[in-house]
Amino acid sequence: MSLTDTSIKTSETALGRDDLAKLVARDIAPGSFVNLGIGQPTLVSNYLTEEQNITLHTENGMLGMGPEAKGDEIDEDLINAGKIPVTELPGASYFHHADSFAMMRGGHLDICVLGAFQVSVTGDLANWHTGAPGAIPAVGGAMDLATGAKDVFVMMTLLTREGASKIVDACTYPVTGVGCVTRVYTDRGVFLTGPEGVTVRETFGCTLEELQELIPVPLKAASA
Amino acid sequence: MLNFVESVQEAVAGIKDGSTVMIGGFGNAGQPFELIDALLECGATELTVVNNNAGQGDQGLALLIKEGRVKKMICSFPRQSDSWHFDAKYKAGQIELELVPQGNLAERIRAAGAGIGGFFTPTGYGTMLAEGKETRFLDGKWQVFETPIHADVALIKALKADGKGNLVYRKTARNFGPIMAAAAKHTIVQVSDIVPTGVLDPENIVTPGIFVNSIVKVAGSGLGTSTTAGKAA
């Protein structure tokens, strides 16, 4: 496929956060065990269908997490990793922290969806620390998720506020994991990353050629 | 040796200056607020505290930090919207921080309780948090050597204890309780209820009493509606 091939353009406009969440939700295989990171990835849960039969993991110690708790449902002993009160679904289970992280670290979790500052061509992830002098670092479970899940999906805007690409040749922010990201969902396109470099699965509101102008690494269309 | 004590003050009375203290809880869920308040009251200082966070708001661990009792925090996620007491101490250079990926924190605590001298894990490989640590290529992956975290004392919260010190927890308040109970030389538990031995179903015991040393009943503790537990952060 040539660089100018436009057959992978699947939307006339860039995708909003909800449309992107919808797309990620659609791509999750039925029956998967999934961990959704704090922030934008949480939106994905709004679009998972009952037929998909997805089990959500929250690393503070629960499988079978339900939607955010409202009103009388709020229970301070039942929170998610973002410390938001949540609900439990039938078939839920609770476990201690070492078991919970064994689910990630032992490769039992099918997919985790994370936000990112940067992703490199070979799938290095930077999402935990800006490295700014004086910044108080906090890592939480980011490194365990990045390293342990079978598939690591990143959801982010393609460009920073200043217009720089977050898909980079090599991360300039401190990395969270090396070669761990398998797929990057952005408002302008979906990218597959790995040892072979970056391929583009689809583009939104731009052609592959236009996308290439925004990203400082060589892109090619993914073979269908 | 298992003791049932009458008050949280009595429960923490033996904690000495310079101790390493594990404190259960993830955010406010499972945080043993009443035991932490008693620790603050008893005056022990120069403490190394192991917790997932570094205190929220103006209660519990946050107050212990504010009062300058904590020399060092070992945790995974200190910076939060309401971690102002830790932030201030850190920026003033008045508290040491050992930042540990959350899964390493849990596994290092578990290792201590299980008598494991260390382990290799892929988590953190190639990152700042693995700098200076031994690495090996094992099972097709680069892995980093991590050591156990032991403690003198653990303060945890459970829902119920029986006369043998067996514990059950409630929902996600379980979090670090079971592994900290095993990792500390002396484990102090606050529970909302003490039930007669034999009442808890042996199949459902989460922490067997062998890991528990002191139990104190705190009314209303561990029911998810504790009045001291503020809003979730």
Image (cartoon, rainbow, N blue to C red):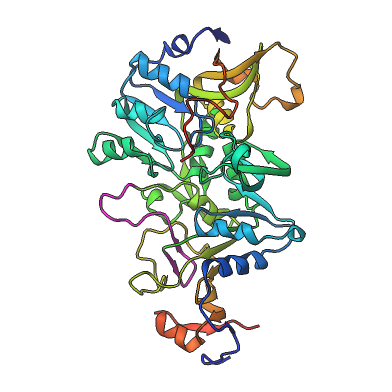
Residue B163 visible in the displayed image: yes
Residue B182 in percent (x, y) is at 56, 25
Among the 4 quarters of the image, the one containing residue A34: bottom right
On the image, the x and y values in percent for residue A194 come to 54, 71
Q: Is residue A224 magenta?
A: no
- Which image quadrant is residue A89 in? top right
- Total numbered badges shown on the rendered structure: 0
Looking at the picture, how far across and down is residue A20, in whole percent?
56, 69
User: Most extreme residue toward the front, as rendered?
Assistant: A71
Main secondary structure of the magenta stretch: loop
- In this view of the protein, can residue B138 be seen by the observer? no
The magenta segment is A118-136
Reply above or below: A136 against B216: below
Q: Is residue A133 magenta?
A: yes
Q: Is residue B108 above or below residue A134?
A: above
User: Furthest-left residue in view?
Assistant: B92
Quarter occupied by residue A88: top right
Q: Residue furthest top?
A: B6
* Residue at left offset 40%, top offset 47%: A138
Q: Is B87 on the left-hand or right-hand side of B24?
A: left
Relative horizontal placement of residue A18, taking residue A87 as reference (left or right): left
Name the residue located 66 percent from the left edge and 11 percent from the top edge.
B163
Quarter of the figure that contains the N terminus of chain B = top right
- Residue drawn where x is 57% and y is 59% of the image: A43
Residue situated in front as seen by the camera: A169 or A68: A68
In terms of depth relative to the viewer, which is nearer, B230 or B195? Answer: B230
- State the image coordinates of residue B165 (x, y, percent, origin top left): 63, 15
